[in-house]
Amino acid sequence: MISDNLREVQQEIQDSCALVSRSSSEVTLVGVTKSVNVEQTIELAEQGVKNLAENRVDQLLEKKEKMSHLTNLSWHFIGNLQRRKVKSIINEIDYFHALDSLKLASEIQKRAEKTICCFVEVNVSGEASKQGVAYEDLAEFIEQLAPFDKIKVVGLMTMAPLHSTKKEQHEIFAKLKKLQESVQEKRLNFAPCTQTSMGMSNDFSVAIQEGATFIRVGTTLFKD
Ligand SMILES: *Cc1c(COP(=O)(O)O)cnc(C)c1O
């Protein structure tokens, strides 16, 4: 049941916050609904999860339309966004979690009719297969976003490798937090960078302990 799963996730958020003396109000649960249908997505929203994430343009648009009767929803796009699809999605979302190239930034700039809240995705682990800006290139990448007035860098996003140990997860998330603070300290108007989007079903507790403010949870919410 979604309601039971949600209660468990909320309890784990609270417990993880307690471990490091954080307030659970600092953590926003983003429900990742990419693997479920509209009915299940509606059920999650009705249980109070108002931040919803998809990684496919068509699915997000379809769900958003079918859920237009629900109020106060925020739509997040996670995962790879092809440049040719920017036009159809960018003005429909509240957060974009995967900004990782200047080409994509230019396309967003060209198509956006409002300021888009973006997370810059960082490849902290250095895995070759991972998306994201390389750790050592981040500072320069952020500076290069200055001319794009439609893009606001609200924070940084990362993913831990699939089969990482707890210790590795701690290291990766702590590194992202440090990077986020280093950008925030620059006090750039276009990049306030106060947030970190990190932690999924398997590792959100660790991410919270390392300072996550947005966690992206799918599988655990919809398990049988
Ligand atoms: C699928 C996905 C998630 C959610 O992962 P779960 O393991 O199902 O919780 C989070 N972030 C991104 C970028 C994803 O693609």
Image (tube, rainbow, N blue to C red):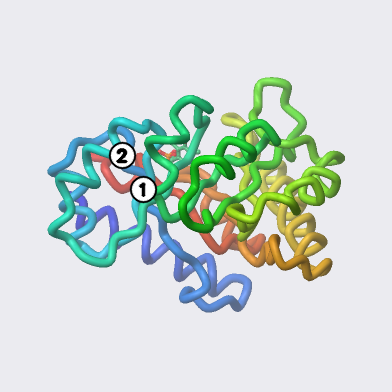
Residue nearest the viewer, comparing 116 with 12 = 116
Q: Position of residue 158 (x, y in %)?
A: 63, 44
- The CA span between labels 2 and 1 is 9 Å
Q: Position of residue 89 (x, y in %)?
A: 39, 39
x 23%, y 57%: residue: 45
Left or right: 124, with 27 as reference point: right
Report the residue marked by disc 1. Answer: 92
Quadrant housing residue 57: top left
Q: Position of residue 87 (x, y in %)?
A: 44, 35
Query: Which structural element holds mark 1?
Result: helix
Left or right: 126, with 97 as reference point: right
Quadrant housing residue 40: top left
Left or right: 188, with 34 as reference point: right
Quarter occupied by the C terminus: top left
58 relative to 193, above or below = above
The disc label shown at residue 33, or none: none
Q: Position of residue 25 (x, y in %)?
A: 47, 76
Left or right: 207, with 86 as reference point: right
Of tags 2 and 1, the one toward the viewer is 1
Given contact means CB atoms under 8 Å apart, are the residues at marks 2 and 1 in contact?
Answer: yes
x 54%, y 46%: residue: 97
Q: Earlier in the sequence, mark 2 or mark 1?
A: 2
Q: Residues within 10 Å of mark 2 (few under 14, many from 20)?
A: many
Query: Which structural element holds mark 2?
Result: helix
Q: Amino acid at mark 2?
A: Leu
Q: Amino acid at mark 1?
A: Glu
Quarter of image, ligand 1: top left
The disc label shown at residue 60, or none: 2
x 35%, y 58%: residue: 74
x 48%, y 74%: residue: 24
